[in-house]
Image: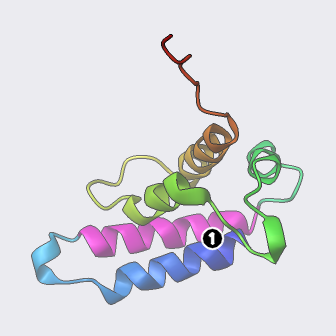
Amino acid sequence: MLAEYLRSCARWRLDRADEADGGGNARSTLGLLDAVAYTQNMDDTERVVVRMGIAGCFALGRFNPGIEGEWIIRCWHYENSEGGPADLFDAIATAAERGLVPAQRTPASP
């Protein structure tokens, strides 16, 4: 599911590649395809996969990284190529976990 999702995001980036983007879309496409290849050596027991699972990223038979996770994926390597697939997956898991924590409520003033 994760590889399929990343592959579709890479395709989205590739479709937007243009000389005017300074190589951002091509760089992002390559970074996402690198992450797709990385998933081939992952299994369901890896800590980051378990973290994403607990956070609900694999619900209903598809991968859903949440709003923040989607933004991380869509922007991956667009500006620069810092970080590898493990960094991407950790960032996605961290964002998904953040989505599980209820927002702090401020008590109403009397």
Please indicate whether residue 29 sits to the left or right of residue 8 in the image.
left
Q: Residue at x 15, y 69 (%)?
A: 22
Tell me: residue 90, above or below residue 23.
above
Q: Position of residue 75 (x, y in %)?
A: 37, 60
> Which residue does the numbered mark 1 point to in the structure image?
37
Q: Position of residue 32 (x, y in %)?
A: 49, 68
**Structural crowding at the residue carrying mark 1, measured as other residues with C-alpha within 10 Å and reported as few (<14), some (14–19) or many (≥20):** few
Q: Residue at x 61, y 71 (%)?
A: 36
Tell me: residue 60, above or below residue 79.
below
Q: Position of residue 13 (x, y in %)?
A: 37, 79
Query: Is 8 or 103 nearer to us in this picture?
Result: 103
Q: Main secondary structure of the magenta part?
A: helix
Query: Is 65 or 106 nearer to us in this picture?
Result: 106
For the residue marked with disc 1, what is the amino acid?
Answer: Ala
Q: Position of residue 6 (x, y in %)?
A: 57, 72
Which residue reaches farthest right? 45
Q: Residue at x 78, y 59 (%)?
A: 42
| 31 part of magenta stretch | yes
Q: Residue at x 74, y 51 (%)?
A: 52
Quadrant, the N terminus: bottom right
Question: Where are the magenta residues, as a range?
Answer: 24-41
Which residue reaches farthest bottom? 15
Please indicate whether residue 99 sits to the left or right of residue 30 in the image.
right
Secondary structure at badge 1 equals helix
Tell me: residue 35, above or below residue 6.
above
Query: Is 48 or 57 nearer to us in this picture?
Result: 57
